[in-house]
Image (cartoon, rainbow, N blue to C red):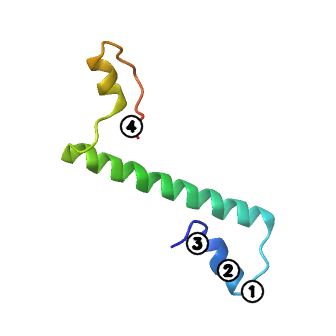
Amino acid sequence: MDEFGSYRREKKEGKKLSKHKKLKDIKEDKVRARKEVNEREFKEIERGTRIPIHLLNEEKGEAKKRTAFEP
């Protein structure tokens, strides 16, 4: 599925979409993509191939309460 899957699918079918519907679909696609990235990063942490930033900072003595991950 592409980045804006549902929007493009309806556009190909020739349906006229309201602006609200387009924005809603795009927002849902972004949320879905973010969830997929979070799941992938969580799996990498479980395998040990990725270290969360807050753990790296803890080692340096700068413990932060962030849940961001190392890129």
Asked if the residues shown at circle 1 and circle 2 are in contact, with their CB atoms under 8 angstroms apart, the answer is no
Label located before the other in sequence (4 or 2) = 2
Label located before the other in sequence (3 or 2) = 3
The type of residue carrying mark 2 is: Glu
Q: Quadrant of residue 62?
A: top left
Secondary structure under tag 4 reads loop
Q: Is residue 68 above or below residue 30?
A: above
Residue of label 2:
10
Residue 39 coordinates in the image, percent (x, y) = 36, 52
35 left or right of 27? left
Mark 3–mark 2 distance (CA, rounded to whole Å): 9 Å
Secondary structure under tag 2 reads helix
The type of residue carrying mark 3 is: Gly
Question: Which residue sits furthest bottom?
Answer: 13
The type of residue carrying mark 4 is: Phe
Q: Residue at x 77, y 62 (%)?
A: 20
Residue of label 1:
14
Asked if the residues shown at circle 4 and circle 1 are in contact, with their CB atoms under 8 angstroms apart, the answer is no
Q: Residue at x 64, y 64 (%)?
A: 25
Secondary structure under tag 3 reads helix
Residue of label 3:
5
Mark 1–mark 2 distance (CA, rounded to whole Å): 7 Å
Residue of label 4:
69
Label located before the other in sequence (4 or 1) = 1
Mark 4–mark 1 distance (CA, rounded to whole Å): 41 Å
Secondary structure under tag 1 reads loop
43 left or right of 35? left
Residue 43 coordinates in the image, percent (x, y) = 27, 50
Mark 4–mark 3 distance (CA, rounded to whole Å): 27 Å
Q: Residue at x 28, y 36 (%)?
A: 51
